[in-house]
Amino acid sequence: YPTAFCEVDGVYTNKAPGGIAYRCSFRVTEAAYLIERAVDVLALDLKMDPAELRRKNFIPQSKFPYKSSLGWT
């Protein structure tokens, strides 16, 4: 995986998101990309196949409805 640099400014607002239209709401596209990239980097550090790392972290169907550590369902 090549090295990359990313500089981000995060802000909190009570206004609805606007600007450039994406096919995904509320800028989830960027968050999903960063999560997937982080999993790829972790797999590389662990010398593990990225698909295998994802498989190990799937929530099994028997655990649904799943309650996260933050209490979200």
Image (cartoon, grey):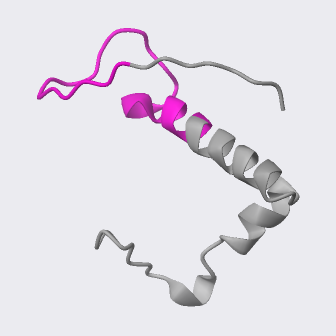
Specify whether residue 31 is painted magenta: yes
Q: Main secondary structure of the magenta part?
A: loop
Indicate the quadrant containing the C terminus: top left, top right, bottom left or bottom right.
bottom left
Instruction: Estimate the x, y position of residue 43 in percent, counting from the top left.
Output: 78, 54
Q: Most extreme residue toward the bottom, as rendered?
A: 62
Residue 54 image position (x, y, % from top left): 73, 62
**Residue furthest toward the top?**
19
Tell me if 30 is positioned left or right of 52 in this view: left
- Residue 19 colored magenta? yes
Q: Is residue 60 left or right of residue 26?
A: right
Residue 40 rendering spot, x and y as whole percentages: 74, 46
Seen at 73% across and 73% down, the residue is 56
Residue 9's image quarter?
Answer: top left
Q: Residue at x 81, y 54 (%)?
A: 50
**Residue 42 or residue 61, whichever sits in front:** 42
Which residue sits at x=82%, y=25%? Answer: 2
| Left or right: 70 as drawn, with respect to 62 | left
Q: Residue at x 48, y 17 (%)?
A: 7
Q: Is residue 61 above or below residue 6?
A: below
Residue 16 vs 28, above or below: the answer is above
Quadrant where the N terminus is found in the figure: top right
Of residue 41 and residue 51, the one placed in the foreground of this image is 41
Residue 12 locus on image (x, y percent): 19, 29
Quadrant housing residue 59: bottom right
Marker count (numbered): 0
Magenta range: 9-33
Front residue of 10 and 61:
10
- Relative to residue 13, is residue 54 drawn left or right? right
